[in-house]
Image (cartoon, rainbow, N blue to C red):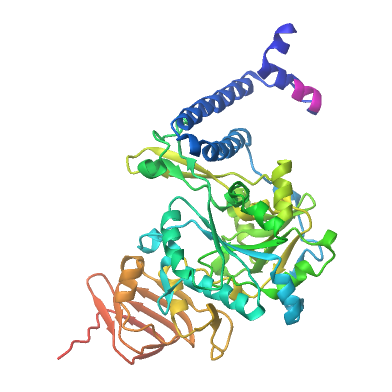
Amino acid sequence: MEQITQNPLLLTANESKIRGHQRIPSGSQEFLEVTKKDAENRLKLELDRLLDKAPEYERPKFKKEFDGFQRLFDRFLRETGPSIVWNKIEKLPPGSVRDYGTLTTPSADVIHEMLSKLIVVKLNGGLGTSMGCHGPKSVIPVRNDFTFLDLTVQQIEHLNKKYKVNVPLVLMNSFNTDEDTQKIIRKYQGLQIEIYTFQQSGYPRVNKDTLLPIAKSIKVQEDIEAWYPPGHGDFYESLRNSGLLKKFIEQGREYCFISNIDNLGATVDVNILNLLLNSSPDSRPEFLMEITDKTKADVKGGTLIQYENKLRLLEIAQVPKDHVDEFKSIKTFKFFNTNNLWIKLDAIERVLSEGSLVMEVIVNPKVLDNNIPVIQLETAVGAAMKCFERGLGINVPRSRFLPVKKTSDLMLVMSNLYALNHGSLEMSPQRMFPTTPLVKLGDNHFAKVKDFLARFATIPDMIELDHLTVSGDVTFGKNVSLKGTVIIIANHGDRIDIPAGANLENKIVSGNLRILDH
């Protein structure tokens, strides 16, 4: 008996037996427990070794980030099995999702007062590599040569001028985007907008087999493959670590509106802000998630569920395999998460101080250029919803979800479907229905922005388009009009040139069509 009390691992097992009335772990469980403890200790030694290489003035920053990584790693080791039990999912209770149409628009003087309590945060950590661009994704031109960042700045500057307020724009950069972003934002210095930036954590990638960091140097830029930004769930701790959370709370700011910088529909909405601030201070929602009706194009998107008396985000990665079809069903789960979130700043401070901010660990496996298999441990910002009080979903129009992930999305936002108004894209009143057309462009010829732009003399008229599929070596002349369903397929070795002024309505074009100058 004395031996048991002297062995901390066996003591832990014994304690769990008393607390949970479980039997002492079997030999295999004990072995797993010892190996997990060993992995934790070895990781800590490696992180300490890296920390020793950091310059003195940078050590506190790295120490905070490594502590965050160690906590995530420990949870990765210890949390086994599904994060939810499927049959414990409850129906969304009445009042848990408000319809946007029921919100009221406040008067201008109320808006002025409310906006003084808001900050706008844009997630700006991603690169444009998937669209064939160098540097931050936010500097890709999307409309009239304006970039994502330009449009965001225009929106907020217009808000500040119109309501005589000072809503700050806060950019969460990653080590991939920070340096370039700092240079780019200098051009906005003469505008009526305060821009703040902070850098999210850089975590070490770990070898899939040894579970040890592959980093040899603490200098991230010199060993960039060994590091990664750990997803946007890192927002909460990084905002606090930067000192900005404290600063904004002291200024009297109450809410942050956070969204992806590539979602061109995510503009400040005064009706939603009014809903948040118009309730009594002790009943204000701490976390509001904008959701929208799911279509067949969104079946993999996260959804909102009620679970253990709390609203929470459910992602497809959390769904047991035999329930994936049910998760994708539009009838069972009607909404999906736009990742437009409104969160109370003092509540962020509270959950961080309490240590109650726990988000599901996302394990992202990768294979590096040198064929070393690694894993990245990440979290998602919306997964924190369950940690806050008085969570609320709001069913917003589809127009608030306009992400640009591919050149097919870029084609939509560059077209005459939208007009630009002070940095905001508004759908043309000539469009008879509010849904956007479904556009599919072949990866081989259209995936990169440069290749995509070279294939259009001008972006076609798409006002009456329902569905467009383009595959193969296809080019478009000036002033082409596309209506209904249009499918254009150039087979391998063939080329199709759609002539200037062509009007294609419910057409399938295939084979080889070249218009030659003479």
User: Residue 513 appears in which quarter of the rendering?
Assistant: bottom left
Please tell me whether residue 287 is drawn above or below residue 359 in the rendered image: below
Q: Quadrant of the C terminus?
A: bottom left
Q: Is residue 17 magenta?
A: yes
Q: Is residue 248 magenta?
A: no
**Residue 513 makes an appearance in the image:** yes
| Rendered residue at 22%/83% (across/down) | 514
Seen in the image, is 374 located left or right of residue 515?
A: right
Depth order, front residue of 228/161: 161
Please tell me whether residue 341 is drawn above or below residue 70 in the rendered image: below
Seen in the image, is 304 located left or right of residue 402?
A: right
Q: Quadrant of the N terminus?
A: top right
Residue 210 location in percent, x, y?
45, 29
Residue 143 location in percent, x, y?
44, 77
Depth order, front residue of 67/430: 67
Residue 118 location in percent, x, y?
68, 65
| Rendered residue at 41%/42% (across/down) | 220
- Per the rendered image, the range of residues in magenta is 15-19
**Residue 99 makes an appearance in the image:** no
Residue 77 location in percent, x, y?
58, 33
Please tell me whether residue 339 is drawn above or below residue 14 in the rendered image: below
| Rendered residue at 48%/28% (across/down) | 46
Q: Residue furthest left?
A: 518
Main SS category, magenta section: helix
| Rendered residue at 39%/35% (across/down) | 217
Callout count? 0
